[in-house]
């Protein structure tokens, strides 16, 4: 993991097309802005984990149902 220090108004660039800016710092909370192309999905990590778990569950359920239908 790369750890960087940034101040309000500073930014960093990832892969030449994603910019993360520090908009505000208030106590222990940091407000960031993300500029990225529309085809680059941006998720909060906790939401990303939920999506991945739901996808895995759906794949497992679909596979089981498919096998049941196949073998009757």
Image (cartoon, helix red, strand yellow):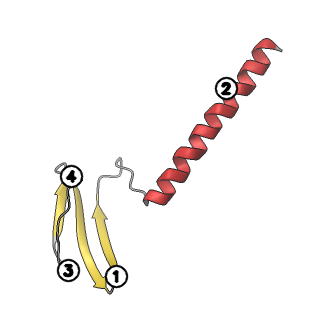
Q: Which badge, 1 or 3, is on the more N-terminal residue?
A: 3
Contact? badges 2 and 3 (CB < 8 Å): no
Contact? badges 4 and 3 (CB < 8 Å): no
- Residue 39 location (% of width, % of height): 35, 47
Contact? badges 1 and 4 (CB < 8 Å): no
- Residue 59 location (% of width, % of height): 62, 33
Mark whose residue sits in front, 4 or 2: 2
Residue closer to the observer: 15 or 45? 45
Q: Residue at x 30, y 69 (%)?
A: 33
Q: Which badge, 1 or 2, is on the more N-terminal residue?
A: 1
Q: Which mark is residue 63?
A: 2
Q: Which mark is residue 28?
A: 1
Label 2: how many residues lie within 10 Å, few (<14), some (14-19) or many (20+)? few
Image quarter of the C terminus: top right
Give the distance between the C-alpha atoms of the residues marked 2 and 3, in whole angstroms. Answer: 49 Å
Q: Which badge, 4 or 2, is on the more N-terminal residue?
A: 4
- Residue 11 location (% of width, % of height): 17, 68
Label 3: how many residues lie within 10 Å, few (<14), some (14-19) or many (20+)? few
Secondary structure at badge 3 equals loop
Secondary structure at badge 2 equals helix
């Amino acid at each position: 993991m790369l750890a960087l220090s940034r101040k309000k108004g500073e930014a960093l660039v990832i892969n030449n097309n994603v910019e993360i800016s520090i908009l505000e710092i208030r106590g222990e909370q940091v407000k960031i802005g993300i500029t990225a192309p529309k085809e680059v999905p941006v998720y909060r990590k906790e939401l990303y984990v939920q999506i991945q778990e739901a996808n895995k569950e759906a794949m497992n359920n679909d596979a089981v149902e498919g096998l049941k239908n196949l073998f009757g």
